[in-house]
Image (cartoon, coloured by chain):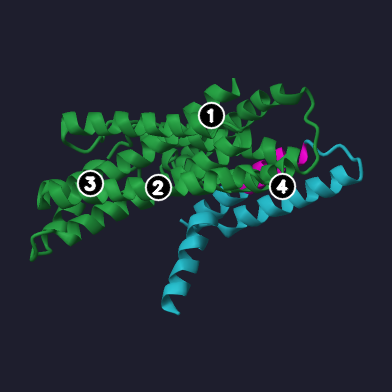
Chain colours: A cyan, B green
Amino acid sequence: MSTVRGFGRFCYDFIVGDDWTVALAVVAGIALTALLAHHHVTAWWCMPSTVTVSLVWSLVRTTRRR
Amino acid sequence: MSALLLVLATFAAAAVEMVEALTIVLAVGVTRGWRATSWGVVAALAALAAIVAVLGPAVARLPLAALRIGVGALLLIFGLQWLRKAILRASGYKELHDEDAIFREEVAEVSAVAITTKFDGYAFTIAFKGVFLEGLEVAFIVITFGSSQGRIGLAVIGALAALVVVAVVGAIVHAPLSRVPENWLKFGVGVMLTSFGTFWSAEGAGVAWPGGELCLLVVVAYVAALSAAAARVLAARSHTVVLPGQVRPR
């Protein structure tokens, strides 16, 4: 059980890293982009905006803690 | 153009990780001998090659839209993590990597364990773990980057070139490569991964970029400018102006 848990922990650290909000923002941004594109709304701005907001938010969160 | 960016990105990512792995390998090899250490390195490189050889073609068989969404999301998450750390280091909020200090710590740690058998399993394990764990992210970058462009061979060449350069320089100087501008490289790799991830994930989700592939250059320029601006703002806030590649005043 501890091996499975250890492997799960390793995968989480490897993919999600030390700020889960970044991974969540990326998934949400892609979902929103797909939704807008599906309804024929111009959506190219959506992912750059996601990058901007998630990067700035992650930096603010980290530096505020220190 | 994108082929050149592909090779540069995998070269830089592999170089950064291999510099860190080299520090561990040197510490173990110098302290406990080179036989088991070398086998650890060889085994780790073989395991990484197997991962790329097995997963690469499998990933390349996925439908292009699904591949670009999945790969784009992974690259974005990896890229934003690299960028975030590089910006925090550049602005003084996080310590710059000090390979000399890491080398000294590693030497002290591995010296404390006695050699009890003919084949030093401890040295093998530490060398294997060091190279494998540092290289795993590079393997994923090679697989995702390469398969999305249908040029996994080019991505492998970029990573192998870095491996050879770091190994040769490491063998010549026989010391940790503390002068490599690690943070610059991390900054550059973060910008590349984030830009490609942005571009591909949006394309996979059904977006048509204005200007087509040329828009990728605009995305790269935007992400680089955003990251540089963030580093400057944070450096001003922490009163420590340290740009990527510079050494922080002690």
Which amino acid type is shown beneath numbered disc 4?
Answer: Ala
Element on which disc 3 rests: helix
Q: Amino acid at mark 1?
A: Leu
Q: Using the rendered image, report if marks 4 and 1 lie on a common chain.
A: yes
Specify few, some or many for label 3: CA neighbours under 10 Å numbering under 14, 14-19, or 20 or more.
many
Q: Distance between the Cα atoms at labels 2 and 1?
A: 19 Å
Task: Tell me the subunit letter for badge 4.
Answer: B
Q: Is residue B241 left or right of residue B116?
A: right
* N-term mark: 2 or 1: 1
Choose mark 4 or mark 3, whichever is in front. 4
Q: Residue at x 72, y 44 (%)?
A: B63
Mark closer to the observer (4, 1): 4
Mark 1 = which residue?
B6
Position of residue B120 relative to residue B155, above or below, is: below
Which amino acid type is marked by label 3? Val
On whether residue B93 falls in the magenta region, the answer is no
Q: Position of residue B109 (x, y in %)?
A: 17, 59
What percent of the width, then of the height, locates residue B246?
A: 36, 30
Q: Chain of mark 2?
A: B
Indicate the secondary structure of the residue bearing disc 1: helix
Q: Is residue A49 magenta?
A: yes
Residue identified by numbered label 2: B48
Q: Residues within 10 Å of mark 2 (few under 14, many from 20)?
A: many
Q: Are marks 2 and 1 in contact (CB under 8 Å)?
A: no
Q: Which sits in the foreground, B82 or A65? A: B82
Q: Which residues are magenta?
A: A45-54
The subunit carrying tag 3 is B
Label 3 belongs to which residue? B25
The residue under label 4 is: B66
Q: Is residue B98 visible?
A: no
Nearer-N-terminus badge (4/2): 2
